[in-house]
Amino acid sequence: MNTTVSEGEALAKALSAYDSDAVEMMVAPPFTHLDRVGAVLKDSKIAMGAQNISADGFGAHTGEIAGEMLADLGMRYVIVGHSEARGRGEDDALIREKAKRALECGLVAVICFGESAEIYATDERVAFLKRQVAEALKGADANAEVVLAYEPIWAIGTGKTADGDDADAVIGEIRASLPEGMRDSVRILYGGSVKAANVASFVSKENIDGVLVGGASLKADEFMKIADEASHV
């Protein structure tokens, strides 16, 4: 929850100069910013996404955002199951329903998964992550438009990052556990204190298809540097 609308618009204007085909870029501003930021980026190469979605459609759900509303605003992506949303009580069942609604509305669901420091330190780590992903994808078609994002909770906003080789190994395990029709087509990102100085250590790996950038995306110059570094891998 960062930036006022005017600050978000200014950030979008700075990012709109991005003109490379080497990296696919998406931004997910707060709901209040979507219309104005979308207008700024309309003719750019940057796709738009939202930070969350309701599991319900239109109706008596005050305070929620329906997928139909996001699609009508021109959103292409929506983040589902971010670690901060999970921290507020969103469980696997709710995240699955949100992903389902996103797909029903023609949106690409960016489904986040990750483990706490406590689980990271145990032998159950990979099994825990596989369960999260399997629950989120339960009932989804093999050709469903989803992106997975591994964001270890212990690396979110802490300045800590997973080792590139470790993240690659974990994501490889997740990829191998996917239904056969999804295994080769689904993109899997790494997210967790990503910055220009370390992005290459992730996107250079065999199983990592990109990154989910957090705090560094609030500074246009740093975000552009991340994209530039990734484009040279």
Image (cartoon, rainbow, N blue to C red):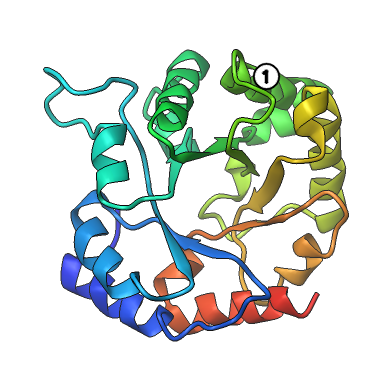
Q: Residue at x 87, y 43 (%)?
A: 169
**Residue 121 showing in the rendered view:** no
Q: Circle 1 is placed at which residue position?
A: 134
Which secondary structure, mark 1? helix
Quadrant where the image shows the C terminus = bottom right
Q: Position of residue 152 (x, y in %)?
A: 64, 42
Q: Position of residue 2 (x, y in %)?
A: 29, 60
| Vertical placement of residue 228 versus 100, above or below | below
Q: Is residue 224 left or right of residue 184?
A: left
Q: Residue at x 32, y 81 (%)?
A: 13
Residue closer to the observer: 180 or 171: 180
Q: Residue at x 19, y 23 (%)?
A: 58
Q: Quadrant of residue 7?
A: bottom left
Q: Is residue 104 left or right of residue 67?
A: right
Q: Position of residue 79 (x, y in %)?
A: 45, 42
| Vertical placement of residue 32 versus 24, above or below | above
Q: Kindly identify the amino acid type of the residue bearing the numbered disc 1.
A: Ala
Few, some or many residues within 10 Å of mark 1 (<14, 14–19, 20+): some
Residue closer to the observer: 80 or 179: 179
Q: Quadrant of residue 130?
A: top right
Q: Is residue 116 left or right of residue 202?
A: left
Q: Position of residue 141 (x, y in %)?
A: 63, 21
Q: How many marks?
A: 1
Q: Quadrant of residue 124?
A: top right
Q: Residue at x 66, y 25 (%)?
A: 133
